[in-house]
Image (cartoon, rainbow, N blue to C red):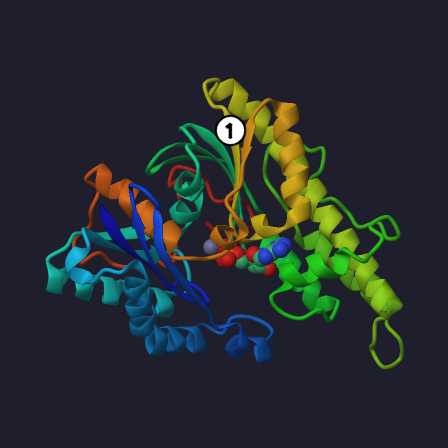
Amino acid sequence: MLILGIETSCDETAAAVVSDDGARIRANIVLSQLAEHRPYGGVVPEVAARAHLDHLDGIIAQALDEAGIDCADLDAVAATAGPGLIGGIFVGVMEAKAIALARRLPFIAVNHLEGHALSPRLVADVPFPYLLLLVSGGHCQLLAVEGVGRYRRLGTTIDDAAGEAFDKGAKLLGLGYPGGPAIERAAAAGDATRFSLPRPLKGRPGCDFSFSGLKTALRQQVAMLTDAEGRLAPRDAADLAAALQAAIGDSLVDRTTHAAAQFHRRWPEGKSLVLAGGVAANRTLRARLAELAAEAGLAFVVPPAALCTDNAAMIGWAGLERLRLGLTDPLDFAPRPRWPLDPAAAPAIGAGVKA
Ligand code: KG4
Ligand code: ZN
């Protein structure tokens, strides 16, 4: 089977061709819009939608070319249909539907979070059920993955996502956008013990997350350290970046430890802990979660960094897993700006728009 995957839900215009045999990823093209959004210090939805519109045709052509196939060889087309920035999602979904209609192919509407959730199965043989820590710019959740389309949420953030904590922290430290990689780079030269930042919810029961108090504490530290011109010394920025990364890490480890205990009780046959989403690209976090998994008696799986940050290979793969189960969608499927993986889970208090 050969599936075309399309991803346009945030600031990456991406297309990929995946297959269920041999080399699973036949092509994986990601065009980052970083340069277009950098002047604004974050993603501007209208700018993103227009950039997707300008580039998607070319990116798809490039993916098909790299895979050495054309549309006639495809078995299905899958596109991210939510959650995310609705303008961009429309661009990807309309393109996928048009190809499906013209080529009489099945269309698969993929939940972006399911793309991240199933991404480990693209690179390793990870059986269901598994415990998933999904950490990205928009989401921070602990889920039991029981199967394709079957997710039980154990915890979520009550305010910011982990990626947001990195991005907002980097902005406060003047390290630029996107924040995650910038914090990781700066932290490598910093001393994580010089400043003590709070660990919101640490030690409290349950598996929910909170990061907004951390951001406030960081803002206060920055205010105390900046000079009259509003400048922060590189040494201070590095030490604060290291402190922030350590605090986020501690809180992820604490909540995931609780989740692992719950997972053992409710899914005793489960054997793996998976780390996925853009924040999973962070090397320190990967090492800390690997340690936790070993202590909890779980195998640790994390996709390579390029498959953790947004890409279309994971969308094509989720489409392939759904197609194998006969789960295709009609061409009038309406994109969903909000689309929780576990619709039965109650919204977290104060969670705002987060699913
Ligand atoms: O999954 P993703 O590419 O997009 C969303 O679906 O949100 O995740 C993007 C997030 C951003 O917040 C970015 O700062 C964070 O992942 N990120 C990282 C690293 N690389 C990307 N966070 C920490 N360390 C990194 N190396
Ligand atoms: Zn994502």
**Where residue 338 sits in the image (x, y, percent)?**
39, 55
Rendering quarter of residue 205: top right
Nearest the eye: 190 or 252: 190
Horizontal arrangement in the rendering, residue 252 relative to residue 335 (left or right):
right
- The residue that appears at 76% across and 56% down in the rendered structure is 187
Mark 1 residue CB less than 8 A from any atom of ligand 1: no
Horizontal arrangement in the rendering, residue 236 relative to residue 52 (left or right):
right
Position of residue 45 relative to residue 17, above or below, is below
| Residue 311 can be seen in this image | yes
| Residue 205 can be seen in this image | no
**Where residue 153 sits in the image (x, y, percent)?**
47, 36
Horizontal arrangement in the rendering, residue 188 relative to residue 327 (left or right):
right
Quadrant, the N terminus: top left
Rendering quarter of residue 79: bottom left
- The residue that appears at 72% across and 33% down in the rendered structure is 203
Q: Quadrant of ligand 1?
A: bottom right
**Where residue 63 sits in the image (x, y, percent)?**
32, 63
What amino acid is found at the position of numbered circle 1 in the picture?
Ser
Nearest the eye: 38 or 121: 121
Position of residue 299 relative to residue 117, above or below, is above
Please, what secondary structure does the residue beneath circle 1 have? strand
Please give the residue where the numbered disc 1 appears in the rendered image: 272
Could you classify mark 1 by the number of other residues whose Cα lies within 10 Å: few (under 14), some (14-19), or many (20 or more)?
many
The total of numbered circles placed on residues is 1
Position of residue 220 relative to residue 270, above or below, is below
- The residue that appears at 50% across and 24% down in the rendered structure is 271
**Where residue 351 sits in the image (x, y, percent)?**
54, 51
